[in-house]
Image (cartoon, rainbow, N blue to C red):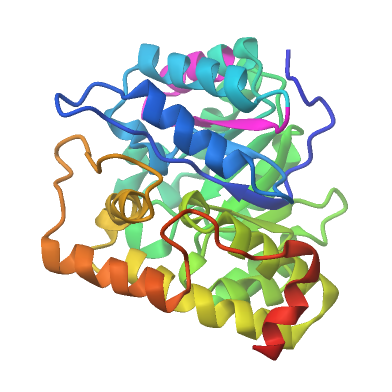
């Protein structure tokens, strides 16, 4: 059973990284250290595991189950844990959903099947069937991961609205819509339905603008490194404190620009390097086909962390309860 039965998908939800040893096996002590560091951030709503940030594409079913089990053991008594459901075949997605439900997750983040990349937007019934298979296997709240249009895996808004009508457990979308006008349309439309669907931004490279459009929260891999700044930004926007939001954004901007630079696929690779630079991890290892980034890029990340005044001892010194004081700096 879910440990947080009344969980609603809103607020600040980091997606955590996964540490590896030199032989690409999972480094459990370092993974736990990272998870515990992120979970200690005041103001979080939940934490996501088995997502892009933890290289779920390269993890077996058994590894995903152990990642979830250990995460629940480590921090599941303090925060809801959202489990990713990353699978191309609907029956595999249903199996992951059942496993995560039985383990004690509080919600499921449903990734689109890569099969839909080849014209799936023209066959909305495929999305219906995929989500229905997951909903039949689990009674947990579902979060639809809506990809950017350039990936060819985006759901048209009409498809998402149709899903909300057919899948009662669908409670939110993680919106990666990269076009601001479409992103705002999603927020306004979905959060105004008779049964409102929360929109969680994952546009971390322009988070201030995204949250200002009215998103109910954010679900982001950048939260693995700057969760306190994300909480401060969210609170400032919720208060309508534009000056505070701008000051926080000034700190976030060099960091997110470094993380989300081309090629986009290296974003979580870069976050691992940032964790090492900050003394929060002992090494930055990714599973192939991902590859370690170059030293000049690591140097750029180091410079970005310093520009954002993120301390190398892991104590950023940000008082989240008085984030507006940043505006006076």
Using the image as rendered, state which of residue 222 and residue 305 is in the foreground.
305
Residue 29 image offset from top left, x and y in percent: 40, 24
136 in relation to 203, above or below: above
Residue 81 lies within the magenta run: yes
Residue 277 image offset from top left, x and y in percent: 31, 56
Q: In which image quadrant can residue 229 be found?
A: bottom right
For image coordinates 84% across by 31% down, the residue present is 6
Q: Quadrant of the N terminus?
A: top right
Q: Quadrant of the C terminus?
A: bottom right
109 in relation to 260, above or below: above
Residue 237 image offset from top left, x and y in percent: 75, 74
For image coordinates 15% across by 49% down, the residue present is 292
Range drawn in magenta: 78-98
In the image, farthest residue toward the right: 194
311 in relation to 292, above or below: below
For image coordinates 33% across by 37% down, the residue present is 55
In the image, farthest residue toward the front: 313
Q: Is residue 120 visible?
A: yes
For image coordinates 65% across by 42% down, the residue present is 163
Residue 67 image offset from top left, x and y in percent: 45, 21
Using the image as rendered, state which of residue 285 and residue 109 is in the foreground.
285
Residue 11 lies within the magenta run: no
Q: What is the tally of numbered marks visible in this picture?
A: 0
Q: Is residue 87 visible?
A: no
Using the image as rendered, state which of residue 123 and residue 226 is in the foreground.
226
80 displayed left or right of 115: right
């Amino acid at each position: 059973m879910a440990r947080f039965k009344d969980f609603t998908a809103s607020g600040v939800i980091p997606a955590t990284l996964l540490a590896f040893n030199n032989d690409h096996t999972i480094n459990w002590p370092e993974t736990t250290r990272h998870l515990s560091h992120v979970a200690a951030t005041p103001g979080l709503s939940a934490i996501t595991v088995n997502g892009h940030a933890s290289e779920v594409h390269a993890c077996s079913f058994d590894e995903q189950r152990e990642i979830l089990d250990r995460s629940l053991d480590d921090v599941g008594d303090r925060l809801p844990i959202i489990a990713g459901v990353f699978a191309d075949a609907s029956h595999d997605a249903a199996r992951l959903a059942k496993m995560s439900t039985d383990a004690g997750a509080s919600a499921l983040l449903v990734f689109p099947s890569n099969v839909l990349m080849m014209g799936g937007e023209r066959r909305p019934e495929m999305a219906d069937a995929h989500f229905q298979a997951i909903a039949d296997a689990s009674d947990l709240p579902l979060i639809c991961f809506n990809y950017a249009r350039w990936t060819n895996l985006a759901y048209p808004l009409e498809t998402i609205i149709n899903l909300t009508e057919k899948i009662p457990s669908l409670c939110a979308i993680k919106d990666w819509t990269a076009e601001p006008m479409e992103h705002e349309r999603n927020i306004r439309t979905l959060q105004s339905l008779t049964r409102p669907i929360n929109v969680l931004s994952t546009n971390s490279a322009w988070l201030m603008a995204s949250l200002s459009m009215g998103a109910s929260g954010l679900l982001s891999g950048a939260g693995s490194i700057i969760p306190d700044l994300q909480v401060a930004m969210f609170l400032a926007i919720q208060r309508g404190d534009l000056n505070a939001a701008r000051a926080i954004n000034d700190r976030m901007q060099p960091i997110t620009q470094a993380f989300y630079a081309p090629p986009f696929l290296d974003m979580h690779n870069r976050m691992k390097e940032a964790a090492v630079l900050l003394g929060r991890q002992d090494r930055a290892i990714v599973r192939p086909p991902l590859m370690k980034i170059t030293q000049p890029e690591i140097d750029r990340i180091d410079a970005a962390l310093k520009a954002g005044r993120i301390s190398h001892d892991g104590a950023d010194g940000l008082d989240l309860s008085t984030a507006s004081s940043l505006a006076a700096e």
